[in-house]
């Protein structure tokens, strides 16, 4: 199944470079481009992409607000991959809190860019744990702590969540805990439900802001 991608970046050269890289990959096709966040919703409704690869800093509407808008108004929204120059950019953290599925550095190699698109398209989050840990430092939240306390995670769910914060995939978590991938998937789904989280990224944000990590 081909993964369709919408590119959103105010730099034409960046969009051209990403299009060249992604269109050369088997199973990935770029279906459209936008130069600012304001155009995103209209293009998403028109093109129905599987993934939006979007710059975090743009004029008119940045990637944070564009992420919030897409998730608020688009039924069954696409996955959102934030593209950034610096991994310690506060804008990136806010985009993740807004609901983005992960982030990608502009200096990433072509294979890394393609793998990033495939990762979020499959429903996994794409995080750089060290960067998220650095960005989350000092961002303790009473509401996140309340979510964690109410969740009353089981011992196994605690172990799974701890590995999720390290950026491990379901298969990697399964190998680490010596359990089946389907069992991990069940635990992850339970954690998301207890947290009221849209996806793994949101669960990881709660883990950091609550002081769990």
Image: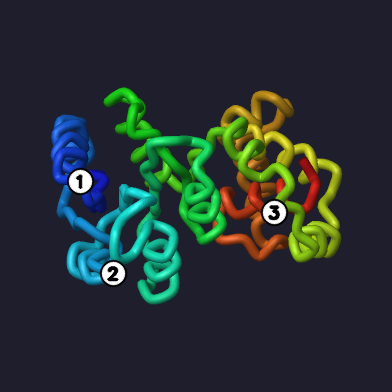
Q: Which residue is mark 3?
A: 206
Indicate which disc residue 11 carries: 1
Q: Nearer the viewer, residue 153 or 36?
A: 36
Left or right placement of residue 129 versus residue 17 in this view: right
Q: Which residue does the image show at 45% across and 67% down from the upper left?
A: 68
Left or right placement of residue 105 versus residue 174 in this view: left
Q: Which residue does the image show at 21% across and 37% down from the upper left?
A: 18
Q: Say which element carries label 3.
A: helix
Say whether disc 2 or disc 3 marks the residue closer to the N-terminus. Answer: 2
On screen, residue 193 above or below 23: below
- Residue 50: quadrant of the picture: bottom left
Q: Which residue does the image show at 76% across and 53% down from the upper left?
A: 140
Whole-percent x and y of residue 46?
18, 68
Q: Which residue is outermost to the front?
A: 59
Left or right placement of residue 149 versus residue 172 in this view: right
Determine contact: label 2, label 3, CB under 8 Å: no
Residue density around tag 1, few if under 14, some if 14–19, many if 20 or more, within 10 Å: few
3 vs 1, front mark = 1
The quadrant of the picture occupied by the C terminus is: top right
Indicate which disc residue 145 carries: none
On screen, residue 120 above or below 39: above
Say whether disc 3 or disc 1 marks the residue closer to the N-terminus. Answer: 1
Q: Which residue does the image show at 44% across and 35% down from the upper left?
A: 86
Between the C-alphas of marks 2 and 1, the distance is: 19 Å
Residue density around tag 3, few if under 14, some if 14–19, many if 20 or more, within 10 Å: many
Q: Say which element carries label 1.
A: loop
Whole-percent x and y of residue 207?
72, 48
Between the C-alphas of marks 3 and 1, the distance is: 33 Å
- Residue 42: quadrant of the picture: bottom left
Whole-percent x and y of residue 9?
25, 50
Indicate which disc residue 41 carries: 2
């Amino acid at each position: 199944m081909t993964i369709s991608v919408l590119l959103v970046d105010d730099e034409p050269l960046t969009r051209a470079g990403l299009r060249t890289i992604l269109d050369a990959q088997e199973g990935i096709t770029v279906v459209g481009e936008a130069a600012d966040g304001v155009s995103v919703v209209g293009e998403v409704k028109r093109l129905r992409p599987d993934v939006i690869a979007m710059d975090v800093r743009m004029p008119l509407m940045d990637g944070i607000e564009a992420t919030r808008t897409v998730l608020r108004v688009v039924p069954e929204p696409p996955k959102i991959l934030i593209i950034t120059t610096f991994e310690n950019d506060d804008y990136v953290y806010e985009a993740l809190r807004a609901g983005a599925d992960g982030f990608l550095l502009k200096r990433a190699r072509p294979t890394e860019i393609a793998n990033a698109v495939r990762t979020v398209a499959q429903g996994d989050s794409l995080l750089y744990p060290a960067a998220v840990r650095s960005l989350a430092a000092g961002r303790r939240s009473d509401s996140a702590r309340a979510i964690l306390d109410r969740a009353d995670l089981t011992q196994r769910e605690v172990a799974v969540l701890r590995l999720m914060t390290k950026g491990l995939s379901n298969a990697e978590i399964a190998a680490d805990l010596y359990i089946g991938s389907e069992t991990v998937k069940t635990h992850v789904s339970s954690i998301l439900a207890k947290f009221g989280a849209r996806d793994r990224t949101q669960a990881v944000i709660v883990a950091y802001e609550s002081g769990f990590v």
